[in-house]
Image (cartoon, rainbow, N blue to C red):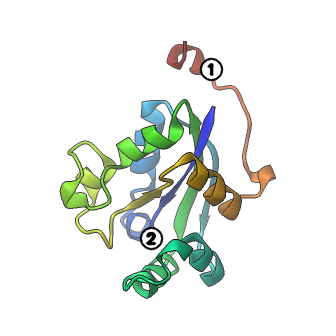
Amino acid sequence: MEKTFVMIKPDAVQRKLIGEVVQRLEKKGLKLVGAKLMTVPQSLAETHYSEHKDKPFYSKLISFITSAPVFAMVVEGEDAVAVARHIIGATNPSEATPGSIRGDLGLTVGRNVVHGSDSVASAEREINLWFKPEEISQYQSPDEVWLYE
């Protein structure tokens, strides 16, 4: 099974959308195997978003992600990265399809509710940044027999 990293951003935490986002991931069949509510330290934010360091929006992004708690998660399932990205929707909420998290709950790119890893390599990197191995559970969910052939 593949794992991916999903983070509910400060805007969504403040809007009390944690349950809504988690419910959408779980309803699809993804299994929550790690989760924590936390205020992001500056150093973690800078490492996480290092690929954007030279972009004009970088400092605003770091300020935003460290401004209030986030809900960081590891979810697991077959093709978890692609499935989560589909549920999350396009980066720009105005371009995200109705039914996706960003399409239904977001308005602007700067407050787009959720982050999801964009590849298996990114997922592995981000999971290792945000979680210690012992913070990720391994368990068999009873509904897995009904999800996978």
**Which element type, helix, strand or loop, lies under badge 2?**
helix
| Residue 95 image point, x, y percent | 20, 55
Residue at screen point 52% across, 38% down: 80
Amino acid type indicated by mark 1: Pro
Q: Nearer the viewer, residue 64 or 117?
A: 117
- Residue 67 visible to the viewer: no
Residue at screen point 52% across, 14% down: 146
Q: Earlier in the sequence, mark 1 or mark 2?
A: 2
Q: Nearer the viewer, residue 36 or 91?
A: 91
In the image, residue 115 above or below residue 51 = above
In the image, residue 12 above or below residue 142 = below
- In the image, taking residue 68 as reference, residue 86 lies left or right, namely left
Amino acid type indicated by mark 2: Pro
Q: Which dot marks residue 14?
A: none
| Image-quadrant location for residue 107 | bottom left
In the image, residue 118 above or below residue 143 = below
In the image, residue 78 above or below residue 65 = above
Residue at screen point 63% across, 31% down: 1
**Which element type, helix, strand or loop, lies under badge 1?**
loop
Residue at screen point 73% across, 42% down: 137
Q: Nearer the viewer, residue 19 or 140?
A: 140
- Residue 130 visible to the viewer: yes
| Residue 120 image point, x, y percent | 57, 46
- In the image, taking residue 110 as reference, residue 134 lies left or right, namely right
What residue is shown with label 1?
142
Q: Nearer the viewer, residue 2 or 134?
A: 2
Q: Residues within 10 Å of mark 1 (few under 14, many from 20)?
A: few
Q: Residues within 10 Å of mark 2 (few under 14, many from 20)?
A: many
What residue is shown with label 2?
10
| Image-quadrant location for residue 45 | bottom right
